[in-house]
Amino acid sequence: MEDHHDNHVTSYAQNFKVLLVLLLLTISTILVVKLDLGHFTVAMALFLASVKTTIVLTYFMHLKGEKLILRLMVGGVFLLFAIIVIITFIDYYFRII
Amino acid sequence: MSTTEHSEHSEHSEYIDVETGKMGMWLFLFTELFLFGGLFIVYAVMRARYGEDFHHAALELNAFIGATNTVVLLVSSMTVAMSLTAIQKSQKNLAIGLIFVTLLLAIVFMINKYFEYGHKFELHLYPGSDVMRNLPHGEIMFFGLYFLMTGLHLFHVVVGGILLTIVMLRVKSGKINKEHFLLHENGALYWHLVDLIWIFLFPLLYLIT
């Protein structure tokens, strides 16, 4: 029954480690763009941004210790957004003007 | 359900449903996601259409300032997350200090933005200027989106700063403490959202050319 907040207090050390990972990913993003992988540059930069987003959501925003319903809601919303992006691009590429 | 908190201090029994309060904040964050998400879709389609113009226009942006602000926001995200840890451990002064550092970093972000926008204005690159009106269509689109998206994001930084100032004052007065820190949690969630949006703005606007 009891489900108090203090069950999942994130330690200072863990917060710092998360920051280090995020900074490393930022540097990777800059390097990837500098290296210029042609068509893969944008995809790679977006992929790294998605990884960073997942880390921020999981650790800084404490989704890791949250109830399943909240995690499903967040996952669902991102899925919905992905579907909207895909539908928009299907429309853009297959529209006959 | 089980997390309904009861405040013994007030005369009227005051119930704060932490789970619902947090879920409400998340629902609000979802609307924010679609606010910026819509703009990202416009950006993506326009980039697909005016690839060449977007390439030229993006060269104009200062990637160094963009990268600096990325680091500033990431560090501030950590300090605000740590302040929540501090309040959960009843380390009141440390919590206040960490929120204060977060606010300082927000100010650093805004100062950087001031110089960045200032430089654009010196070059007469702002919506409605003669210089911008004569640019190719795609470049007008890029700078329009640049100002709209970073401007809207900057507005969120200001709102987040005000929210965290309120949180800091309530921590100071003891209204936010080890037992009751819903507002602190939600304020931190908002600040992380500001960081999340920048995580996408930085590569899309500043890095990729």
Image (tube, coloured by chain):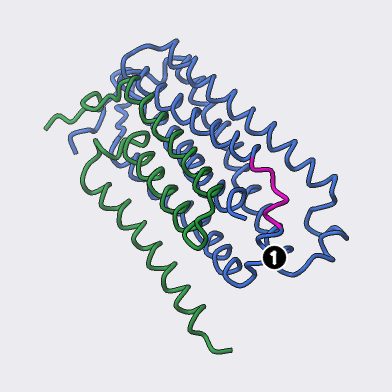
Q: Residue at the spot x=83%, y=64% of the render? A: B133
Q: Residue at x 39, y 33 (%)?
A: A21
In the image, residue B175 above or below residue A22: above
Image check: B185 left or right of A73? right
Q: Which residues are magenta?
A: B57-63
Chain that is coloured blue in the picture = B
* Residue visible at 37% across and 34% down in the picture: A60
Q: Nearer the viewer, residue B136 or B79?
A: B136
Of all residues, the one furthest to the right in this rendering is B130
Chain for mark 1? Answer: B
At mark 1, the secondary structure is: helix
Q: Position of residue B125 (x, y in %)?
A: 80, 53
- The residue carrying mark 1 is B53
Residue A47 versus residue A92: which sits nearer the camera?
A47
Amino acid type, callout 1: Asp
**Residue B60 at x, y percent in the picture:** 73, 50
Who is closer to the viewer here, B27 or B100? B100
Q: Is residue B65 left or right of residue B167?
A: right
Which shade of the palette goes to chain A?
A: green
Image-quadrant location for residue B78: top left
Instruction: Describe residue A46's horizontal placement relative to residue B133 as left or right.
Output: left
Whether residue B61 appears in magenta in the rendering, the answer is: yes
Kindly identify the residue that appears in the image at 53 percent across and 33 percent down. B73
Across and down, in percent, residue B33 comes to 46, 53
Name the quadrant of the N terminus of chain B.
top left
Picture coordinates of residue B167 (x, y %)? 48, 25
> Badge 1: how crowded within 10 Å, few (<14), some, or many (20+)?
many
